[in-house]
Image (cartoon, helix red, strand yellow):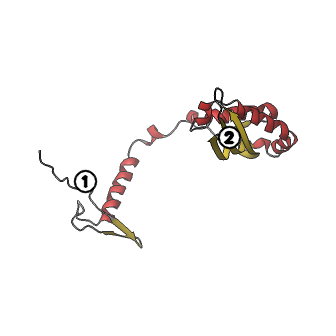
Amino acid sequence: MKNRRLPKLSAFSELDLLGGVCRQRDSAVASPLGLGPFLSWMLVSLSLVIAGCSGDAEATAPSEEDVLVDNTTAVEVDLGEFSVTIPESGSNSSFVLDFSLYGMADGEFEGTIEEHLEDTEKRVRNKIVIAVRKLTREQLLDPTLAGVKTPIRDAVNEVLGDMPLTSVGFRSINLSQQ
C-alpha cells in the first residue's frame, strides 16, 4: 500500500494579525468564496450568530419559577495560615499540609462574624487542625479538595453556631509527603 500525502484540512494556514489586519502567509491556500481570510471569518461568525438567534423566544425564556433571585451578598473571612502534619496509618511516612484558609459567610453576618472569630480564634484553629489530622489519604489526594473543605467547614461551623460558613477555600495549599 502506498503512502499518500493528505492535503491540509483547514481553509487557511498561518494567519498573522498585525495592526488589526489579517494576512495570509501561505498563498497556495485560498478562501473558499474568494474572500480574504478576515472577511471569510466574519461571514462564518455572522451566519452562526444569525442561526443562534433564530427560533421561538418564548420557548427559550425561563419561567418565573425557574428564576431564582439572590439578593444576599457573601462576606469573606480570613481563617489564617496552617501547617499540619498528618501521620499516615500503617506506615512510617506522614503528610504535611501547608495552607492559607478563608471562609465565605452570608453578608448579613458582616462585622459580627469577624468579631466572633477573633473571640474564638484558638478554638477555631484547634478545630481546623483536628479536622485536618483526621483526613484520609484519599481525601488529601482528591483533586477537587471537596474531601478537605467539607470537614474543615463543618469544624469551624461547630464553633460559629448560628453564623455558619457557607464554604471554605484555600488561598494557597501545598501537600508534601515525608
Residue extending furthest toward the front: 92
Q: Is residue 89 above or below residue 71?
A: above
Q: Earlier in the sequence, mark 2 or mark 1?
A: 1
Residue labelled with disc 2: 96
Q: Position of residue 175 (x, y in %)?
A: 63, 42
Q: Position of residue 177 (x, y in %)?
A: 63, 39
- Report the front residue among 70 and 93: 93
Which type of secondary structure does the marked residue at label 1 adopt? loop
The tag on residue 9 is 1
- In this rendering, which labeled residue sits more in front, label 2 or label 1? 2
Q: What residue do we see at 38% from left, 46% from top?
A: 54
- Cα distance between the residues tagged 2 and 1: 51 Å
Q: Position of residue 105 (x, y in %)?
A: 73, 40
Question: Is residue 29 found left or right of 169 in the rendered image?
Answer: left
- Report the front residue among 129 and 15: 129
Q: What residue do we see at 79% from left, 30% from top?
A: 158
**Residue type beneath disc 1:** Leu
**Residue type beneath disc 2:** Val
